[in-house]
């Protein structure tokens, strides 16, 4: 089975950092577009799927809190990704998914307009691995899942050529655990 993938997220909501005790938004401040190709092989008890995608992050704007209240504009960039997903079906109702992906993050340029500072972001690449256990409460209609995902984040550098004292370097990883309930309308 061969799938072509496309996804577009418009710049519908403003991006704002937490300022003076106000909550931040989770919006990016710019549009995002994904393109991809996936190929899969499905049998009665097992499915494997490989994918290649490219995500285009359009120019974004954020109301910032640091170093002073102002606006930061991030240039557009591409982030290609490779992934593999599997599903093992133990019974008609119980299955497990295992997935892995590697994303080659971009290196956007950012300008804070107050104060007028330019910096370059080397975002570092990420590797994700995840598992989930799925149960069909109503076969092929209502599925509950318990999910775990771990992201290995490569180092990220923020380089300020105009003021190297502000240069930062960090890396880390994250763990996400969740539950989901999906219903298919037919």
Image (cartoon, rainbow, N blue to C red):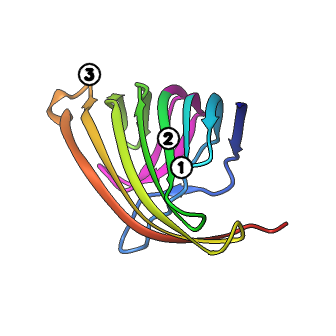
Q: Earlier in the sequence, mark 3 or mark 1?
A: 1
Crowd class of label 1 (few under 14; some 14 to 19; many from 20; radius 10 Å)? many
Of 184 and 135, nearer the camera is 135
Measured in 3D between alpha carbons, the distance from the residue under mark 3 to the one under mark 1, in whole angstroms, is: 25 Å
Circle 3 or circle 1, nearest the eye: 1
**Per the image, is 22 magenta?**
no
Q: Which residue is located at x 59 percent, y 30 percent?
A: 56
Q: Secondary structure at mark 3?
A: loop
Q: Secondary structure at mark 1?
A: loop
Check disc 3 and report the residue beneath it.
161
From the top left corner, tell me how far across and down residue 95 is, in percent: 50, 60
22 displayed left or right of 47: left
Check the image and name the residue furthest to the right.
186
Circle 2 or circle 1, nearest the eye: 2
Check the image and name the residue furthest to the bottom.
137
From the top left corner, tell me how far across and down residue 115 is, in percent: 36, 41
Q: Which mark is residue 6?
A: none
Residue 153 placement: quadrant: top left
What segment is highlighted magenta in the picture? 52-80
Circle 2 or circle 3, nearest the eye: 2
28 displayed left or right of 162: right
From the top left corner, tell me how far across and down residue 174 is, in percent: 28, 53
Residue 49, placed above or below residue 138: above
Check disc 1 and report the residue beneath it.
28
Residue 167, placed above or below residue 135: above
**Per the image, is 61 magenta?**
yes
Check disc 2 and report the residue beneath it.
85
Q: Earlier in the sequence, mark 2 or mark 1?
A: 1
Q: Secondary structure at mark 2?
A: strand
Q: Quadrant of the C terminus?
A: bottom right
Q: Earlier in the sequence, mark 2 or mark 3?
A: 2
């Amino acid at each position: 089975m061969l799938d072509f993938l496309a996804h577009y997220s418009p710049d519908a909501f403003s991006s704002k950092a937490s300022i003076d005790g106000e909550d931040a938004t989770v919006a990016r401040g710019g549009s995002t577009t994904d393109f991809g190709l996936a190929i899969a092989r499905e049998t009665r008890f097992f499915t494997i799927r490989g994918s290649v995608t490219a995500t285009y992050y359009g120019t974004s704007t954020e109301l910032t809190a640091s170093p002073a209240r102002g606006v930061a504009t991030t240039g557009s960039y591409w982030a290609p990704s490779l992934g593999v997903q599997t599903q093992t079906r133990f019974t008609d109702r119980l299955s497990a998914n295992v997935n892995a992906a590697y994303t080659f993050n971009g290196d956007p340029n950012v300008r804070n307009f107050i104060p007028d500072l330019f910096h370059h972001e080397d975002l570092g690449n990420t590797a994700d691995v995840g598992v989930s256990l799925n149960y069909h409460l109503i076969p092929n209609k209502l599925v509950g899942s318990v999910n775990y995902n771990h992201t290995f984040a490569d180092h990220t550098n923020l380089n300020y050529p105009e003021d190297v004292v502000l240069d930062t370097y960090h890396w880390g990883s994250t763990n996400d655990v969740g539950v989901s309930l999906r219903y298919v309308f037919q």
